[in-house]
Amino acid sequence: KQEVTQIPAALSVPEGENLVLNCSFTDSAIYNLQWFRQDPGKGLTSLLLIQSSQREQTSGRLNASLDKSSGRSTLYIAASQPGDSATYLCAVTTDSWGKLQFGAGTQVVVTP
Amino acid sequence: NAGVTQTPKFRILKIGQSMTLQCTQDMNHNYMYWYRQDPGMGLKLIYYSVGAGITDKGEVPNGYNVSRSTTEDFPLRLELAAPSQTSVYFCASSDPGLASEQFFGPGTRLTVL
């Protein structure tokens, strides 16, 4: 059974530092991996989607890498800002129906 | 486009009551999903649908039912509510395809007392 783990569960950094968020999964037979942002009391916003054939995706200050063979993905957020404070969730798709399996998330606080 | 909308935003139920959580999307997506999120946990899939008239169980379907009569709507029915169903419920939709991201609604916070 696929297990998705995110460590640490919480992270606090001063503004301007780069953020590094980790996601690991136990079964490398994934179709894609998505990173989401969740603000308190809100829904999820998709940040980046990496297909299984890709090694990384970039959007603005965000860069996500994928190493399927080791079962790991990393989300980098450059030059963090207080507005980046949120919970970040990773999820993998293990079939063609797009069903997602989520990690528990990393809660990020960026202090001014 | 409104995207994915969910109603109600909040609801308190008594044990044994029933209710329907509504979900509508205006993006003409074939695939729709219901997830639940318990405090401090990731989301878990309850049911999903790959088109009108086609539904299937996810990881945690017990105590729930769904229907999909149109492309736009995917209601989730709770029968005989139990305290274990206290959670935040999210509906999502996507196009088919491995490059298709899922779009989420704002969620329904349900408490069963």
Image (cartoon, rainbow, N blue to C red):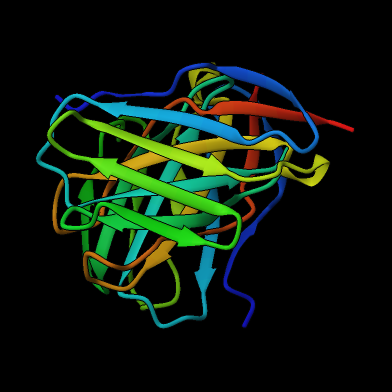
- Identity of the residue furthest to the right in this view: A112
Report the label total.
0
Q: Quadrant of the C terminus of chain A?
A: top right
Q: Answer with the quarter of the image where residue A71 lies.
A: top left
Considering only vertical position in the picture, is B41 above or below B79? above
Q: Return the residue nearer the eye: A68 or B92.
A: A68
Q: Return the residue nearer the eye: B9 or A26.
A: A26
Q: Is residue A45 left or right of residue A97?
A: right
Work out whether residue B23 can be spotted: yes
Q: Position of residue A63 (x, y in %)?
A: 47, 51
Q: Quadrant of the N terminus of chain A?
A: top left
Residue shown at 38% from the left, 29% from the top? A23
Residue shown at 70% from the left, 39% from the top? B11
Work out whether residue B75 can be spotted: no
Q: Is residue A30 left or right of residue B59?
A: left
Q: Position of residue B33 (x, y in %)?
A: 37, 54
Residue shown at 45% from the left, 46% from the top? A35
Considering only vertical position in the picture, is B2 above or below A70? below
Residue shown at 52% from the left, 55% from the top? A47
Q: Return the residue nearer the eye: B45 or B84.
A: B45
Q: Position of residue A18 (x, y in %)?
A: 63, 36
Considering only vertical position in the picture, is B101 above or below A55? below
Q: Position of residue B78 (x, y in %)?
A: 46, 40
